[in-house]
Image (cartoon, helix red, strand yellow):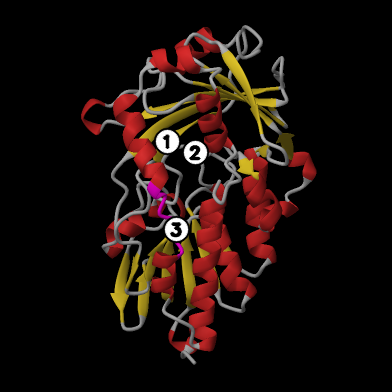
Amino acid sequence: MWNASEFDFDLIVVGASFAGAACAIAAARRGLRVCVLERKRDPGDKLRTTGIIVKEAAERTLLQRIPASLTRRTEAVRLYAPSLKQVALAAPGCYFLTTDTPAVMRWLAGQLREHGAELRLGCAFTDAARIDGGWQVQGVGRSRYLVGADGARSRVARRCGLGEVRQFLYGIEYEFPGAKLADPEALHCFISKRYAPGYIGWLAQNPRGVQAGLALRHDPANARVPDIDGFLLRVGIAGGLPRHLRAGHTRAGLIPCSGPVDCIARDGAMLVGDAAGIVSPVTAGGIHSAWAHGDAVGAAIAAHLRDGGPPPEEVAIDAAPRFRAKRALRWMYDRLQFDWPFDLLLHSPPLRWAAEQVYFHRRGAG
């Protein structure tokens, strides 16, 4: 048994989004003293996630308790070629939940407190130093373990000598409060090398209105901001977006797309979520896989401290999805993306099958 009196906390988690919350709740449920640092005073402010939750996360994790008023079920995808020809995709039993994402993040903060974690809002991680048996986190105290769930540019990773994400997409999303798509029952996805090289654009109905986004491959040497206004002028009518809307909230940020970082954990420090690169290199979906990994890490820390289980660093590494096939698809898409094959083959059985595998694929990750 560890000597708890030597430390202020058993675990400090930096970041209160999905991965950080999953890790903290898993540890707190098992009796650990957990502190979560969140630099924002309002967990629903300045978001960098679309908040789209896949079936597996909606049914197999704590996220199944999200109030129904904060989600909207979507069972179909409409895939648009660059010419704006479209095909409808669906798979029996598969669905997405679009969300009132700011409200979901505030609900998640409430869940942290309800499960016994100490949540410090408006408290940014600044520095940490390795001490005997743990970490001294500046301005917070001594902790046996430190987990970074602080995004694609993780400060925890830099301070603790862990791996850093090197390859990104850059995405921007508008939200149009009160708006309604002509076909609100589908997630509308647009392929376009002009507007979204390396990724896609999208329109979706959520409980608050419409969210419209665009992401592209991020090149640090030739950084480019997605032309979301031009994109919406091009696709808005085809996607059923009403004219002359004024955007409310805007979300923007980097999205990891290269798979897990090389060094996820060592010496009592671990990474989860975007900080660890736990994001699908193809779809850029991360909520389900990030939650599963964060939960595994939190449970492993508790099992190690309370019951002498295996080192949680080993679990953090072993539990991280490898995304091998998706990383190969990412490599191909970055180098071989052309508009004409999608225009030519959109309705062909092979392309339809491939698209349904990407969007539904009876998935094990979201």
Magenta stretch holds residue 322 = yes
Q: Are marks 1 and 3 in contact (CB under 8 Å)?
A: no
Per the image, the residue denoted by label 1 is 253
Per the image, the residue denoted by label 3 is 272
Q: Amino acid at mark 3?
A: Val
Where residue 48 is drawn, which disc sits there? 2
Q: CA distance from mark 1 to mark 3?
A: 18 Å
Q: Are marks 2 and 1 in contact (CB under 8 Å)?
A: yes
Residue 163 lies, in percent from the top left, at: 29, 57
Residue that protrudes farthest toward the front in the picture: 349
Q: CA distance from mark 2 to mark 3?
A: 16 Å
Instruction: Identify which residue, 6 or 157, lies in the foreground.
Output: 157
Q: Amino acid at mark 2?
A: Arg
Q: Which residues are magenta?
A: 319-324
Q: CA distance from mark 2 to mark 1?
A: 6 Å
Q: Amino acid at mark 1?
A: Gly
Residue 161 lies, in percent from the top left, at: 26, 62
Instruction: Find residue 255 and report its image quarter.
Output: top left
Where residue 67 is drawn, which disc sits there? none
Residue 33 lies, in percent from the top left, at: 55, 76
